[in-house]
Image (spheres, rainbow, N blue to C red):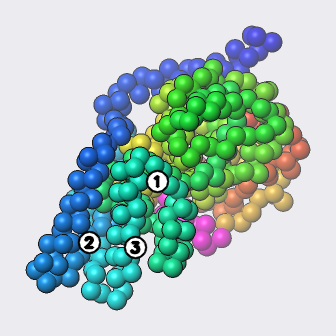
Amino acid sequence: MGSHIAELFTEIDKLRVQLLNNAEVMADCQRVQEGISNNVIFTRIENIILGIVTSLSKDEAPVLALPNRSSWANISFDSAVGLQMSSESSVTTIRSDCPMSVTKFAQILKILSVIYRLVQSNSYATKRDIYYNNTQLFGSQKIVDSIVDDICCLLKVPRRSLHVLATSKGLISGDLCYMEEDGTRIDCHSSSAAVAVSSNIDGIRDIVSSAKFVMIVEKDATFQRLLDDNFCTKLSPCIIITGKGVPDVNSRLMVRKLWDTLHIPIFALVDADPHGIEIMCIYKYGSVAMSFEAHSLTVPSVMWLGLLPSDLQRLRVPEVALIPLTKRDESKLNSLLERPYLTSQPEWQKEMELMKQSKVKAEIQSLAAIAPDFLTSIYLPNKLRFGGWV
């Protein structure tokens, strides 16, 4: 049994050695921003308020200039960091005398005042708490979420340093124990139930794990199937995590925390479709909207384990399980192929070109058309044993 397990992880161990060599090279490029002092936060908020007061004293309408978080023109790519916001990024102007932006101006000031008080009193609030603080002003939770990110970008401070938390949607399971900031000990070993990803990743301490790899699972349904099939026990020791689709910041922070602490291979298991590939790219390279926090969110070492478009042909997945690409899929695929990070990933390009030519996509569940337990009993063990990742 021992030799079988050792054999199973031979390729993974080789990959780990490669990644550790690369990690040493990347270390200088990828310094995670340490927690910023409260005084720095106070000064930055006070400078914004001082600017507004100065404008009013001159009978001028106050204006806020927010870095534009939605434009690729503001993004640069660094293979060691991912997508990051350029220092010369363009800005969006929020005027206090314009009917179109006066409400947003008021919303930003309100949230700045809430943050100032939270940091001052060393207390925390969730984004949901902030919304319910003044539902009439904010109108929707989505607006609060967006403005909190705008303020982080404006102040150049990570959200957790502003004492604003977000409820996590991710789940994690496997060979992992850690301590929450409040002293609660979390054990993720249960084979039948997963643990919710912490809402304060920065506060996690004393991580203990002998896992050989981490596997990011795109969808909750696949994650639950892996739990039901005792995947973490069969391929022990390992860790599996899901952000349930497009990952929230906490799920991304958790993956990054595991990489920084354990330095073990991190694989992505996503659908063989443009949407799944994009989700994997968010974990690996980041997103345009959160590019200002790339240094603490991205994990450039993530490898694509499956489902690969080439797997569909190699395994002869029945045609009944394949889905034709829609116009929207084709558009997304073309957009992905133009992303700056694809030039450093020829193997990924090859897989995506294959999808483009075949004009079909497939969900991970399509493997059940070969055999009900094919995913956990054959596909994943063989992929991990023989190095079937790109």
Residue shown at 59% from the left, 43% from the top: 198
For the residue labelled by badge 2, is the local secondary structure a helix, a strand or a loop?
A: strand
Q: Which residue is mark 3?
A: 107
Find the distance from the CA under tag 3 to the CA under tag 1: 16 Å
**Mark 1 touches mark 2? (CB < 8 Å):** no
Residue stretch in magenta: 326-336
Whether residue 15 appears in this view of the structure is: no
Q: Amino acid at mark 2?
A: Leu
Q: Position of residue 228 (x, y in %)?
A: 84, 40
Which kind of residue does numbered mark 1 sit on? Val
| First in sequence: mark 1 vs mark 2 | 2
Mark closest to the chain's N terminus, 2 or 3: 2
Task: Identify the residue shown where x is 58% and y is 20%.
Answer: 13
Q: Given the image, on which type of amino acid does mark 3 rest?
A: Gln
Q: Say few, some or many: other residues with alpha carbon within 10 Å of mark 1 (under 14 / 14 to 19 / 20 or more).
A: many
- Residue nearest the observer in this picture, 307 or 267: 267
Q: State the separation of the CA atoms marked 2 and 3.
A: 12 Å
Closer to viewer: mark 1 or mark 2:
1
Is residue 334 magenta-colored?
A: yes
Question: Mark 2 Cα within 10 Å, few/some/many (few <14, many 20+)?
Answer: some
In the rendered view of the protein, which quadrant contains the C terminus? top right
Image-quadrant location for residue 101:
bottom left
Q: Is residue 208 above or below residue 256?
A: above
Residue at 36% in and 31% down: 26
Side of 5 relative to 179 (left or right)? right
**What mark, if any, has residue 64 been given in the picture?**
2
Q: Look at the magenta stretch and give its main secondary structure.
A: helix
